Image: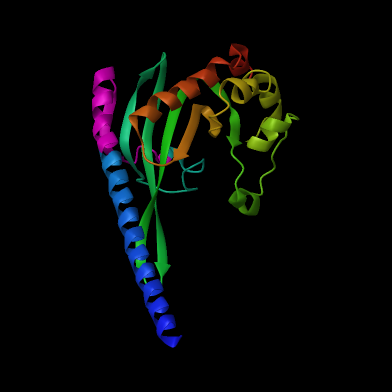
Amino acid sequence: MEHWAGILVLVLLFTFIVGMFALVFTVSARGRKRDALVEEEYAQLPRVAADRGWTYEGRVQGRIDQYCGVRPFPSRGSNLRAWHYTTGEFRGRSFTYFEYRSMNVASGADAGERKQPTIESVFIVTAPGSGPFVQMLRPRILDTLFDRRATMRLGVPEFDQDFRVVTDDEEFVRDALSHTVVPYLLTEAPSEKSPLQLCGNELFTWYRGTLSPRAVDEKLNYLCDVLDRVPAESWTTV
């Protein structure tokens, strides 16, 4: 009996070791494939800009300092860097998009100190006029814990569940956005649900992840669709 028990232990140990090697190989292969795809998409970005008459710069410094204090940027800073910084005109509106990378330090007994960048792909389109500060954010656990700002509810259960609205002007949100933008977010763009932020005369959206040519059209169209639905008179009354 002890002999067979010993054999069983050896078989289980061998199976475990083989399984671990297979897991490491699979994860490594997927990582290499993902990295190759990202590099391929990065290589396409300057070509997309050139084909459309846009201005592309691989990396800039200090151009996005003005956005400190609003999502997804730090509360303060200077000489912030942006990657794949692109400007131009889309559907008759000026735009800017880029990657913003912040560095998080992950420490551990085995890993030591290891810097891991958090990448946010940001898209900004110029509005026809200035508006009040408005954020329509996706609810997150961290917001519940650390963001103590008052939020407004529009009384639309589906929307109130999917977004947190933070604003300096609730009247603008109810008059200019509730009857036009909110229905669009709930019906015509149900899968989008990307955060929105109006600051001055610029409308932002962003997502966590690397920039891709596919996302460029998706996000710029998304912002333009939202702006198309804001009544023209709303901008002149702010």
Q: How many labels sit on residues? A: 0
Vertical side of 217 occupied by 160: above or below: below
Q: Is residue 81 visible?
A: yes
Q: Residue at x 29, y 34 (%)?
A: 41
Q: Residue at x 37, y 46 (%)?
A: 101
Residue farthest toward the front in the current orientation of the protein: 1
Res 100 quadrant in image? top left
The stretch of residues the image draws in magenta is 40-65
Where residue 88 sits: x, y (%)? 34, 22
Where residue 140 sits: x, y (%)? 60, 46
Where residue 96 sits: x, y (%)? 38, 28
Left or right of residue 61: residue 219: right
Q: Residue at x 47, y 36 (%)?
A: 206
Res 121 quadrant in image? top left
Left or right of residue 16: residue 236: right
Of 220 and 199, nearer the camera is 220
Vertical side of 215 occupied by 77: above or below: below
Q: Residue at x 55, y 32 (%)?
A: 196
Res 95 quadrant in image? top left
Vertical side of 92 occupied by 44: above or below: below
Where residue 119 sits: x, y (%)? 39, 45
Vertical side of 201 occupied by 107: above or below: below
Of 125 and 132, nearer the camera is 125
Of 143 and 15, nearer the camera is 15
Of 173 and 161, nearer the camera is 161
